[in-house]
Structure formats: structure tokens, C-alpha cells
């Protein structure tokens, strides 16, 4: 009698995996009158901001004669790169006159180098002296510190136009007219806003790291160079960008202290180029092309550091 084998039991079903929780649907905001007004307002601001650049580009790509004959056309009239070639000195004067130019040229690269020197050296000196003064007001203990800082704050209330004449007389008496030093020094040695900005940031920095460095034998100068400056790199970069932009666009002060084209910045070079064209037939296409070339470095700067510049508007320091 053969033994009967019991049938193998079926394997137990695997435990079912719990269903993944459904992602909550993003609640769709219903349009409201206030939101619609906000979007319309933003659209108007964008158009107002972009339109001047578009109009400059449209004019710079136009034939000057054709543009004067049809000034309201939204597109380039008689499309040509002649104005840019004219500004860069790559176009024959006879061909420039045939396109409506005055035949005048501007040494754009010469003025560009002058602007780079003026803006860069001014920015470096302003940030350097402001950093030293801010550290003295924030970290060093000395008699009369608060009184002197109050005087610095009072300088913020003085309009810059009031200091133009005294600075001009000082530069003239020192014999620094028509020099880079005459353009740079008056604005590079003192900036009340930069000092206030950096001091407020330094007051928010922790003192524990500095105290530890002092216990290790580090001096004030070493603490400034090795600790404070790296921790203050954000505000330093912000002030450097804003200062460079301000110096690049500066027009009135260089106009007062320079008459020699060898040191004049690009802003004055544009004025010279405009004055060289006849009043009866201005070379608007060439002037717009020169303006775009002058604005190009600032546009690149905004595209690269735009987020930092915007954030710096509401920046007051870190804790």
C-alpha cells in the first residue's frame, strides 16, 4: 500500500504594497481684480523699461537718411550695420556720409579704456577705505567713536551737488585738472553710505570667532584680513558692483575737471561725437550705436550679477 503524499500548499500571496499617496493638486488661484491690475502694472513697467533699449537698437540699425524720413517706423529703416561700423572706426568716411552720417568718428576703444580705468580704480579705492572705516566703527573701541559716526551719518543728508564747487577748487589748486587722479580722488576717499552699510553688517557678525583669534595671538589687522573680509564678502561685492556702475555712468564730475580727451571717459566721448555732427542733420543712428556700445558692459554686468544687485536693495546685514 503506497503512501499518499499530501498536495503542496500554495504559497501565500505576497503582501500588497501600500498605494503611494496621491500628490495633492496645486490649488489653482482664481483670478481676481487686484491680481489682474498687478499683472497689468508689471507689464507696463516692463514695456517702459525695455522700450528705450529697443528703440536705440532700431535706430542703430537704420540708415540715417531713411530714418529721418520715416521716424515713426517700429522697425529699422534701411537696415544696415553702418552706424556700428562708423562708431568702431571700420567704415570709410565717404560711405558713412552716403548713409547719413556726418563723417565724424569717435575713438570708442580709447574712451572705453579710460572709463574702465576710472571706474575700476575708483571702485577699488572707495570699497577699501570704506571697509577700513567701517571696521574701525564696528569693532574697535576708541574715544569719540559714536560722535564721529554721527557726523558720518550727517554727511548722508548733504546733497552731493553742494560739494562739487569745493572739490573743483581743491583739485584746481592741487594742479590735478585733466588727470585721472583729479577725477578719482574726491569721490574715492569718503563714502558715508558705504561706511554705514558695511558697519551695520559687521555689527551683526558673531564676536566669538574674533575672540578666539585674539586668544591665539592674532592682531587686529590679521583678524580683518583673514576673518572679517571673508565674512563680509557679500556686501563688499554688492558695493563694488553698484559703485562700478555709478562711476561708469558718471558724467558731470569728469566734465568739470577734464578738457583733455586723453583722460575723458566714454560718457564724455559720446557728447564729443554728438557735437561733431551738424545740428541740421544729426547722426542719430551713429549716436544710438555709440550709446549701445557704451551700455553693453553694464548690460553684461546686470545679466551676470543681476540677482545680487536686486537682493542688495533690501540687504541690511546678517546675524
Image (cartoon, rainbow, N blue to C red):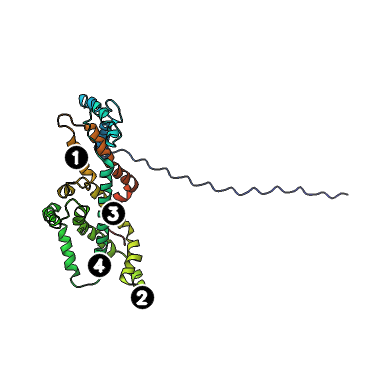
The one of 175 and 317 positioned closer to us in this rendering: 175
N-terminal label among 3 and 4:
4
N-terminal label among 4 and 2:
4
In which quadrant of the rendered image does the C terminus lie? bottom left
Would you say the residues marked 1 and 4 are in contact, meaning their CB atoms lie under 8 Å apart?
Answer: no
- Whole-angstrom CA distance, mark 1 to mark 4, is 44 Å
The one of 42 and 64 positioned closer to us in this rendering: 64
- Whole-angstrom CA distance, mark 1 to mark 2, is 60 Å
- Whole-angstrom CA distance, mark 3 to mark 2, is 33 Å
Residue 151 in view (yes/no):
yes
The one of 51 and 114 positioned closer to us in this rendering: 114
Residue wearing tag 3 = 240
What kind of element bears circle 3? helix
N-terminal label among 1 and 4:
4
What kind of element bears circle 1? helix
N-terminal label among 1 and 2:
2
Count residues near mark 4 (Cα–Cα under 10 Å), then give few for <14, some for 14-19, many for 20+: some
Residue 40 in view (yes/no):
no
Seen at 16% across and 50% down, the residue is 257
Residue 288 horizontal/vertical position (percent): 24, 35
The one of 294 and 278 positioned closer to us in this rendering: 278
Would you say the residues marked 1 and 2 are in contact, meaning their CB atoms lie under 8 Å apart?
Answer: no
- Whole-angstrom CA distance, mark 3 to mark 1, is 29 Å
Q: Quadrant of residue 230?
A: bottom left
Residue wearing tag 2 = 215
Residue wearing tag 1 = 272
Residue wearing tag 4 = 136
Q: Nearer the viewer, mark 3 or mark 2?
A: 3
Amino acid at each position: 500500500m503506497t503512501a499518499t503524499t499530501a498536495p503542496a500548499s500554495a504559497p501565500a500571496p505576497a503582501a500588497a504594497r501600500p498605494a503611494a499617496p496621491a500628490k495633492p493638486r496645486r490649488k489653482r488661484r482664481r483670478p481676481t481684480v487686484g491680481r489682474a491690475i498687478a499683472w497689468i502694472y508689471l507689464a507696463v513697467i516692463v514695456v517702459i523699461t525695455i522700450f528705450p533699449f529697443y528703440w536705440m537698437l532700431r535706430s542703430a540699425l537704420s540708415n540715417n537718411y531713411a530714418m529721418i524720413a520715416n521716424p515713426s517706423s517700429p522697425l529699422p529703416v534701411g537696415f544696415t550695420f553702418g552706424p556700428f561700423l562708423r562708431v568702431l572706426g571700420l567704415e570709410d568716411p565717404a560711405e558713412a556720409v552716403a548713409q547719413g552720417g556726418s563723417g565724424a568718428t569717435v575713438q570708442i576703444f580709447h574712451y572705453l579704456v579710460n572709463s574702465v580705468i576710472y571706474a575700476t580704480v575708483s571702485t577699488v579705492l572707495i570699497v577699501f577705505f570704506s571697509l577700513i572705516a567701517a571696521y574701525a566703527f564696528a569693532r574697535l573701541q576708541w574715544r569719540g567713536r559714536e560722535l564721529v559716526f554721527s557726523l558720518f551719518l550727517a554727511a548722508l543728508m548733504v546733497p552731493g551737488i553742494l560739494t562739487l564747487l569745493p572739490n573743483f577748487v581743491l583739485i584746481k589748486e592741487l594742479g590735478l585738472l585733466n588727470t585721472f587722479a583729479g577725477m578719482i580722488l574726491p569721490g574715492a576717499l569718503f563714502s558715508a553710505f558705504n561706511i554705514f552699510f558695511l558697519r551695520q553688517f559687521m555689527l551683526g557678525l558673531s564676536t566669538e570667532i574674533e575672540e578666539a583669534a585674539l586668544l591665539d595671538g592674532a592682531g587686529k589687522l590679521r583678524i580683518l584680513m583673514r576673518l572679517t573680509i571673508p565674512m563680509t564678502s557679500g556686501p563688499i561685492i554688492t558695493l563694488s558692483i553698484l559703485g562700478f556702475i555709478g562711476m561708469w555712468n558718471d558724467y558731470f564730475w569728469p566734465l568739470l575737471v577734464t578738457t583733455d580727451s586723453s583722460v575723458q571717459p566714454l560718457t564724455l566721448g559720446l557728447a564729443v561725437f554728438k557735437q561733431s555732427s551738424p545740428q541740421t542733420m544729426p547722426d542719430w543712428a551713429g549716436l544710438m550705436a555709440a550709446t549701445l556700445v557704451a551700455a553693453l558692459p553694464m548690460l553684461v554686468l546686470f545679466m551676470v550679477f543681476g540677482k545680487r544687485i536686486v537682493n542688495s536693495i533690501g540687504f541690511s546685514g546678517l546675524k
